[in-house]
Image: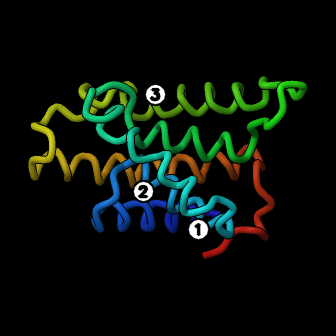
Amino acid sequence: MENMALEARSRAGGKFKDGLNCSEAILHSFNEMLNKPLSVESLKMATGFGGGLGHAGCMCGALTGSVMVLGLLKGRHDPSQSREPGYDVAREFHDRFSNENGGTCCRVLNTFEFDSKDHLRRCLKLTGGTAKLLMEFIQEKKLVDPNTWTV
């Protein structure tokens, strides 16, 4: 379903262009495509992850937004449930992201001055590419019934 991966890339890129940060763009896009299981209030959680955790330059916000999506799909809500399914997909996606991009640290992935034109261009590419990678991962792992996506 290459179309879904391209749709995810397009949505996340568009949301980034419209002013959402990388993490917000990923979470908002997948929330829409999953028929909005998250409230507007819960979407606010992604804000602080942009800029590698609030401009700290650490873990890429597109990656952290992706892990939030994976948590929505494989996470737990009760300590009696196993955390391993959520851990497994998070780790595997982390490794795939790292292999694809050469790292996971915001300041390594994007060396341009924060909010400069070059920085924003690089973040746009990373955000869209990560959304595509995430959709491919979700489809490969069959984490969502393909008939439930909203396009």
Q: Which structural element holds mark 1?
A: helix
Question: Mark 3 = which residue?
Answer: 99
Q: 10 Å neighbourhood of mark 2: few (<14), some, or many (≥20)? A: many
Question: Mark 1 = which residue?
Answer: 32
Please name the residue shown 67% across and 48% down the image. Answer: 138
| Up-down relation of residue 125 to residue 8 (above or below) | above
Residue 17 percent coordinates (x, y): 28, 64
Q: 10 Å neighbourhood of mark 3: few (<14), some, or many (≥20)? A: few
Please name the residue shown 76% across and 48% down the image. Answer: 143
Dot 2 amino acid type: Ala
Colour scheme of the picture: rainbow
| Up-down relation of residue 85 to residue 29 (above or below) | above
Q: Which structural element holds mark 2?
A: helix
Dot 1 amino acid type: Glu
The tag earlier along the polypeptide, 3 or 2, is 2
Dot 3 amino acid type: Asn
The N terminus, quarter of image: bottom right
